[in-house]
Image (spheres, rainbow, N blue to C red):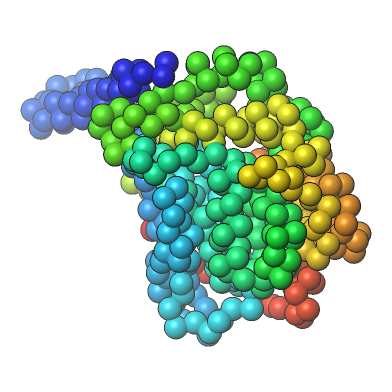
Amino acid sequence: MKGMFSYDLMESTRNTNEWLGASARAMSSYPIWGLVPHPMFKVLSAWGRVTERSFARMVIKPDWGIRTVVGSDGRDHLVDVETVVSRPFGDLIHFKVMGRDPMPRRVLLVAPMSGHYATLLRSTVLSLLPDCDVYVTDWINARDIPVSAGKFDIEDYTLYLVEFMRHLGPDIHVVAVCQPAPITLAATAYLAEAEPKAQPRTLTLIGGPIDPDAAPTEVTDFGRRLTMGQLEHLAIQRVGFKYAGAGRLVYPGLLQLASFISMNLDRHTKAFSDQILRAAKGEAKERDAHNRFYDEYLSVMDMTAEFYLSTVERVFKKREIAQNIFTVAGQRVDIGRITDVAVHTIEGEEDDISAPGQCRAALDLCTGLPDSKKAFHVEPGAGHYGIFAGKSWRNNIRPLVLDFFDENSGLPNRRRTGKPEIRAV
């Protein structure tokens, strides 16, 4: 499957479905059909609108949509998303709140590179902005990166994080969500040995596979069932002629999206059927719950083949980080070198992607860290998404994380907004 043909075939299929939806919507929306006393045309128009929107979203990068935040002075402050560090495969962006005094808490959110854009953390950013100065790793879609930019694997990812942490300085609080948790732990250990003064104050790991074998799930078992050769043959394709990264080997976002949907096919089928019926009745809205969720969920990005394959092989199969034998540029990264950075692990009791135990394994690896600088929390009843973006995050986990920042910063616990008042589009 490494040829461009398979990649372009997927894109052609997506494009055709988008066109079919647009055609059905246009043809069935003519006023003349209002004279026909049959619901078929309304249902066909609704199917067209939902289908066109869904397949169009797959190649659109979502906007952050964060316009203003209410400050402690009670006034609206405009939010500007600025690029602080620009690199070929990912940028460090800053949510600059205009006219607000400098915040004592500075947070680096390490977004997953797992098929979705960093905007997957939009609600996490929204919840932190009233109390923190927020930075986010904004990974770039591999299909848009020319082959001349070179490779990007798990070691390059680690070095990117090291560079971002160095740039932000030692007063930063790092929060890694899901997939990057083990790599962020390694990047912190790398800094602890190479440049101890540049280490962050705290490291919070949320639902990440530090040790995938600690509590196997369907996701981790998938990596076990296939050999690396089989995985490369089935998952890797070359970017087609349409994009700047033509010829680059990638794990296509569309392919990963298909696997995501297949895992919960019944639920997604019902969600779209219900939305079509709502649209036919005139009850669907531009920003209703269905569209808000699927506008983000369907927007996918390609990963470089070398990053995807090296992550599966080294994190899941060989468990290099779990066994503390991970290397960068031929040098071992010893997690035991972390002696000053307070580490907090957070897991969801019902997490079926990174089950409880996988993330907490990080604390056992930090052998040089005193127990007073270690903390863990298992959120009762929470699934994977809920621990960083859902009700569990907003009501229970976010306050714990902010308290953890303060306890390990020499700062008094500050008054926080329980329900941040933020306007977003």
Quarter of the figure with residue 47:
top left
Q: Residue at x 41, y 23 (%)?
A: 237
Q: In this rendering, would 332 be left or right of 19?
A: right
Left or right of 30? Residue 381 is right
| Residue sitting at x 31%, y 32% | 246
Give x and y (percent) for residue 315. 69, 34
Nearest to the observer: residue 309 or residue 256: 309
Question: Who's the residue at 66% across and 45% down the image?
Answer: 328
Question: If the image is split into quadrants, where does the N terminus sit?
Answer: top left
Q: From the viewer's side, name the closer residue of 119 and 245.
A: 245
Residue 83: which quarter of the image?
A: bottom left
The residue closer to the viewer here, 60 or 369, is 369
In the picture, measured across the screen, residue 245 lies left or right of residue 224, that is left
Residue occupying image coordinates x 64% and y 78%: 104
- Horizontal side of 259 relative to 18 (left or right) equals right
Q: Residue furthest right?
A: 371
Residue 327: x %, y % from top left: 70, 42
Instruction: Find residue 65 and report its horizontal and vertical position in percent.
Output: 40, 58
| Most distant residue in the front direction | 330
Q: Is residue 369 above or below residue 131?
A: above
Judge whether 134 appears above or below 315 on screen. Answer: below
In the figure, 215 relative to 64: above or below? above
